[in-house]
Image (spheres, grey):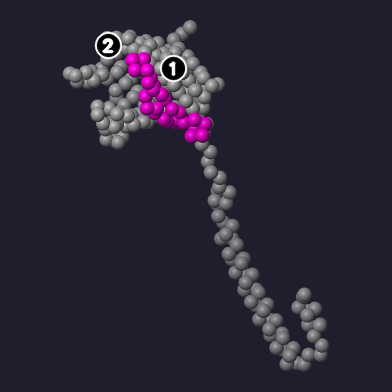
């Protein structure tokens, strides 16, 4: 109800009653004015928040299912491997062929390696598996000499470089293993495996493979 409507509903007020009523109305009006002024002063501060804070959304992780597509095909490879004979570590070299084919419409790859060198004949197999939940790949290697899968290394690609990590026994200790895919072009790339005995502070390479696409 408006104030003037309320006043008209009062029957025959005496002068003192009217004065007191008007005083109360004025005080209430002044209080209402102060409240409105305070609200107007607060509103700009609240609305000045950056839009990013008001409508922020969590960033989505990129899909890495096709990150290993560069690896498909047939490759010539030169491999250097750090062997551990009784006389001490020695680099052994191999030359061979790597054949990589797609499995599960690209969500997996099967890599077959066959090479020969001064240490003899080498055959290996690598199974690459993509995890759509973690958006990461796992790299699982088997040597024909023992016929068992190694501990998988897990990782992903960023800015054209893939890094994969695992923990494995090495010379009686558990060490950190890192595999790096780099220098990737349509016709060549590099894979290097290193180990660390100090939790990743320093790295010592023990396997390097240079691959060049074999032309049909």
Q: Residue at x 46, y 16 (%)?
A: 100
In this rendering, the count of numbered labels is 2
On the image, numbered disc 2 is attached to which residue?
119
Circle number at residue 209: none
Residue 23 in percent (x, y) is at 69, 85
| Crowdedness near tag 1: few (<14), some (14–19) or many (≥20) residues, C-alpha within 10 Å | some
* In the foreground, 105 or 156: 105
User: Is 8 a magenta residue?
Assistant: no
Q: Position of residue 44 (x, y in %)?
A: 59, 60
Q: Quadrant of residue 200?
A: top left
Q: Measured from the top left, where is residue 80 in percent x and y? A: 30, 17
Q: Quadrant of residue 88?
A: top left
**Can residue 46 be spotted in the picture?**
yes
- Given residues 101 and 210, the one toward you in this image is 101
Identify which residue is drawn at 54% across, 51% down: 53
**Disc 2 from disc 1: Cα separation:** 22 Å
Residue under the point 55% across and 21% down: 105
Element type where label 1 sits in the image: strand
- Specify whether residue 150 is painted magenta: yes
User: Relative to residue 103, is residue 124 drawn left or right?
Assistant: left
Check disc 1 and report the residue beneath it: 111
Q: For this view, does 104 lie left or right of residue 172?
A: right
Magenta range is: 131-159
Relative image position of residue 131 (x, y in whole percent):
49, 30
């Amino acid at each position: 109800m408006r104030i003037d409507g309320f006043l008209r509903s009062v029957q025959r007020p005496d002068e003192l009653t009217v004065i007191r009523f008007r005083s109360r109305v004025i005080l209430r009006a002044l209080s209402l004015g102060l409240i409105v002024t305070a609200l107007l002063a607060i509103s700009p501060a609240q609305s000045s928040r950056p839009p990013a804070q008001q409508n922020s959304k969590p960033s989505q992780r990129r899909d890495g299912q096709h990150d290993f597509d560069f690896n498909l095909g047939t490759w010539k490879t030169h491999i250097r491997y750090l062997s551990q004979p009784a006389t001490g570590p020695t680099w052994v070299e191999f030359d061979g062929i790597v054949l990589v084919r797609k499995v599960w419409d690209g969500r997996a790859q099967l890599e077959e390696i066959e090479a020969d060198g001064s240490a003899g004949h080498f055959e290996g197999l690598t199974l690459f598996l993509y995890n759509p939940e973690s958006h990461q790949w796992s790299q699982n290697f088997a040597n024909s000499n023992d016929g068992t899968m190694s501990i998988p290394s897990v990782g992903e690609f960023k800015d054209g470089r893939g890094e994969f990590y695992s923990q494995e026994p090495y010379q009686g200790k558990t060490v950190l293993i890192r595999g790096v895919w780099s220098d990737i072009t349509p016709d060549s790339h590099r894979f290097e495996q290193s180990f660390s005995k100090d939790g990743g502070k320093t790295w010592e390479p023990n396997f390097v493979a240079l691959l060049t696409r074999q032309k049909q």
